Structure formats: C-alpha cells, structure tokens
Image (cartoon, rainbow, N blue to C red):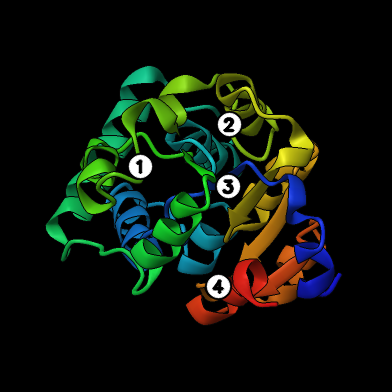
C-alpha cells in the first residue's frame, strides 16, 4: 500500500500507538550492546542483528529463548533476574538514548489534531519508562503506557496491542501503530491494527513489509508525510 492510500483511511483516526525503543528513542544500538554484553558475560552469544530481530519481546522471553537455543533448557528465576539485571546495568552505563530528532514535534501535531498518543512497549526497564513523560511532556501520560509489566505474553503475541485497545476504548479501525521491529509488526497486525513500519535500525525494509506493515519509512520526514501531506 502506498502512503497516500493509507492516509485516505485516516478520517476515523483517533489514536496512534507508538512502540518505544527504535521508534520514540534512538535506543536500539544501546539495547543491542547491552543484551550482547549481558549474555557474553555468561558465555552466551546474542549478536546485534538477533537483538533487532527479537526487539519487542519481554526481557524474560528473550532470556528464555537464548537459554533454550544455546543451553537446551529454560532459565530458572534467579538466572532470569540476573541476566536482566546485567542487561540493565550495561544499558544504564551507556550514554543516554535520546528521542529521535523531530519526534516531539510530530507527536505535538498529532495531539493538536485531537489524536491520542499511546506507548506500547516490551520493555520493563525503569530508566526508560520513567523518562517517557519527561522527554515527551504533555504528550505521553503514565496511564497511556502499556509495558511488559502489563502483559503476560508480550510481542509477537497480540496481547500488548489488544490491551492498549481495551484500555484506550478505541476500535481497531480508529488506530494506527508505528513499529520498528518484525515482532512488533506481527503483534499489531495480529491485533487487527493498521501498522506503519518505521525502520530506524539495521534490518531490511522487507522484513517489516512481510510481517504486514502497510508502509515502511526510514526517516522522520517520511513518517510526517504519511500523516500530514496532502
């Protein structure tokens, strides 16, 4: 689908559901480094490309995937906690991830048109979740964030976006999702929501398209054009 064809269906748009890492924040590079180092400290391998491919999973799901693939068993609760603690420690030692240039202005334009802003993320990392309302003042509200703490399964299961639909009170046809990761696109499409791929990372555009992203863009101005160009 071309951007103008998608935009023609925006008459009923009431809300945009944003992923966080790699969509609101230029944070995926930091995430890739932190996950890689956390697993490497335990003698396990989790290369950067695989971090991008699995972005959107909850932390516990990510750890279990790596343990099953490389150790042939599930991680116990202590191991789950320790890997995520190390990941958070490595992440927080890196320079702080910043919002993408132009994202605040883009969200402000949506807000001025009466379009509600929600965040749907697989993260449970306090540093990032607490920063959302500070970095996007008046745009992101705490009660409009669905995080890993709010779901049992997480992406690529539709639960996170179904939870956002339920909590927001919006119908599927009133919402558009903006996602940067294949698993996030899977989740949104499985929930029946139109999805735009915002490919800010190292993966091929086709990986987002094949999961159901109706349009894939790579730059902030292209994302703005999808919503605001005539």
From mark 3 to mark 2, how far is it between C-alphas? 19 Å
How many neighbours does mark 3 have within 10 angstroms: few (below 14), some (14-19), or many (20 or more)? many
Q: How many marks?
A: 4
Label 3 vs label 2, nearer the camera: 3
Residue 4 appears in the figure: yes
Residue 141 appears left or right of 194: left
Q: Label 4 belongs to which residue?
A: 224
Q: Label 1 belongs to which residue?
A: 140
How far from the left and from the top, in percent, is residue 10? Answer: 74, 55
Do the CB atoms of the residues marked 2 and 4 lie less than 8 Å apart? Answer: no
Q: Label 2 belongs to which residue?
A: 154
Res 180 quadrant in image: bottom right
Name which residue lies at 22% across and 38% down: 130
**Mark 4 or mark 3: which comes first in sequence?**
3
From mark 2 to mark 1, how far is it between C-alphas? 21 Å
- Determine whether the residue tagged by mark 1 lies in a helix, strand or loop: loop
Label 2 vs label 4, nearer the camera: 4
**Mark 2 or mark 4: which comes first in sequence?**
2
From mark 4 to mark 3, how far is it between C-alphas? 13 Å
Residue 26 appears in the figure: no
How far from the left and from the top, in percent, is residue 92? Answer: 17, 52
How many neighbours does mark 4 have within 10 angstroms: few (below 14), some (14-19), or many (20 or more)? some
From mark 1 to mark 4, how far is it between C-alphas? 18 Å
**Mark 1 or mark 4: which comes first in sequence?**
1
From mark 2 to mark 4, how far is it between C-alphas? 28 Å
Q: Which mark is residue 16?
A: 3
């Amino acid at each position: 689908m071309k951007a103008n064809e998608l935009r023609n269906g925006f008459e009923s748009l009431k809300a945009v559901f944003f992923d966080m890492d790699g969509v609101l924040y230029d944070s995926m590079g930091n995430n890739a480094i932190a996950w890689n180092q956390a697993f490497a400290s335990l003698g396990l391998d989790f290369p950067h490309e695989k971090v991008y491919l699995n972005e959107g999973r909850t932390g516990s799901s990510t750890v279990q995937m790596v343990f099953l693939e490389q150790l042939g068993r599930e991680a116990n609760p202590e191991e789950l906690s320790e890997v995520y603690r190390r990941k958070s420690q490595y992440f927080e030692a890196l320079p702080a991830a910043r919002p993408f240039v132009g994202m605040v202005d883009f969200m402000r334009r949506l807000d001025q048109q009466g379009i509600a802003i929600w965040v749907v993320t697989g993260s449970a990392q306090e540093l990032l979740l607490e920063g959302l309302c500070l970095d996007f003042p008046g745009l992101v509200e705490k009660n409009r964030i669905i995080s890993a703490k709010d779901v049992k399964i997480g992406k690529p299961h539709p639960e996170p976006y179904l939870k956002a639909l339920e909590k927001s009170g919006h119908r599927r046809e009133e919402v558009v999702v903006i996602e940067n990761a294949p698993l996030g696109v899977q989740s949104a499409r499985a929930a029946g929501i139109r999805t735009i791929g915002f490919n800010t990372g190292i993966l091929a555009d086709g990986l987002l398209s094949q999961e159901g992203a109706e349009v894939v863009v790579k730059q902030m101005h292209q994302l703005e054009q999808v919503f605001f160009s005539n």
